Amino acid sequence: DTGVSQDPRHKITKRGQNVTFRCDPISEHNRLYWYRQTLGQGPEFLTYFQNEAQLEKSRLLSDRFSAERPKGSFSTLEIQRTEQGDSAMYLCASSEEQGTPLHFGNGTRLTVT
Amino acid sequence: QKEVEQNSGPLSVPEGAIASLNCTYSDRGSQSFFWYRQYSGKSPELIMFIYSNGDKEDGRFTAQLNKASQYVSLLIRDSQPSDSATYLCALCPGGTYKYIFGTGTRLKVLA
C-alpha cells in the first residue's frame, strides 16, 4: 500500500491556460474521488469514479472541468481556460467500498495568476 | 441548513486537557462518519471513523455518535501541541456517492 499519489504537487499557471492533474489511487481501491479545497473551507466534492465509470459529478462543476479514469486505475482532472477563482488545493482520494474511509493524496495546489 | 456543521473555532485548550470537537448533520440517512485532521497546507489525514451509535476509542481519541440527535463528536485526551490542527467532520449521506465535509474546527493546544 503506497498510498494515493498526486502529481504535480504545485502548479502555477496564467489565466486562460489549461492544466491537467494526475491521481494514482491505492491499487486495491476501485473508487476514486476528486475534491477541491479553498482556504478556510472543507473539501468540496467534484466527481466520483467507480472503476472507469464516472458515476457522480457536482453540479457546481462547470464545463471547463473534465475528469477521466480510462482504465479504472489512474485518473486525470483537466481544467480548461483557467480562471483566478480556480486557485485551490485539488485533492484526490480513494476508498475500498462505499462508506469506508477516504484516503487522500497530498493534493495539487493550483495558483492561477 | 448546512449538511455538516462545525464550529470554526479556534478552540484553545491547555496541554494535557481534553479537547472536545462537535459536529451536527442534517441527513438522517447518513450511515458512516469520519474525523480527519488537517495541518496547514497539508491534505486531510484520517483519525477515526464510526458507523454505530455509541463510543469508539482508539488511543487518545474517542469518537461518539448519536444518530437520534444527529451529532458526532471527537474527544482528544491528554492533548499535545502536536494536536494543533484543523479537524474535519465528514459523512456519507444517503442517496449519493459523495462524502460531505464540514468546514472544520481549528484546535490550538497551548504548551
Image: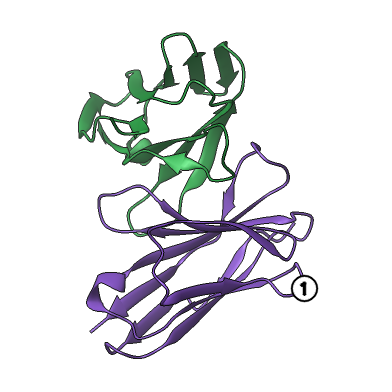
Chain colours: A purple, B green
**For residue A110, side relative to residue B7 (left or right):** right
> In the image, what residue occupies the spot 54% across and 24% down?
B29
> In the image, what residue occupies the spot 56% across and 41% down?
B96
> In the image, what residue occupies the spot 33% across and 82% down?
A82
Judge by depth and name the residue closer to the eye, A94 or A47: A47
**For mark 1, does the 10 Å Cα neighbourhood hold few (<14), some (14 to 19), or many (20 or more) residues?**
few
Residue B76 in sight from this viewpoint? no
Question: Which residue is the site of mark 1?
Answer: A71
Question: In which quadrant of the rendered view does residue A101 lie?
Answer: top right
Q: Point out residue A16 in the picture as x, y percentages from the top left corner.
A: 30, 89
**For residue A2, side relative to residue B111 (left or right):** right
Q: Point out residue B67 in the picture as x, y percentages from the top left corner.
A: 50, 13
Work out whether B72 lies above or below B47: above
Counting the numbered discs, the total is 1
Judge by depth and name the residue closer to the eye, B28 or B66: B28
**For residue B23, side relative to residue B30 (left or right):** left
Judge by depth and name the residue closer to the eye, A69 or B105: A69
Work out whether A52 lies above or below B27: below
Q: Point out residue B91 in the picture as x, y percentages from the top left corner.
A: 50, 34
Look at label 1 and name its amino acid: Lys
Question: In which quadrant of the rendered view does residue A23 lie?
Answer: bottom right
Chain for mark 1? A
Residue A65 in sight from this viewpoint? yes
Q: Point out residue A86 in the picture as x, y percentages from the top left corner.
A: 31, 72
Question: In which quadrant of the rendered view does residue B57 lie?
Answer: top right
**For residue A79, side relative to residue A38 (left or right):** right
Q: Quadrant of the C terminus of chain B?
A: top left
> In the image, what residue occupies the spot 50% across and 19% down?
B62
Q: Quadrant of the N terminus of chain B?
A: top left
Q: Secondary structure at mark 1?
A: loop
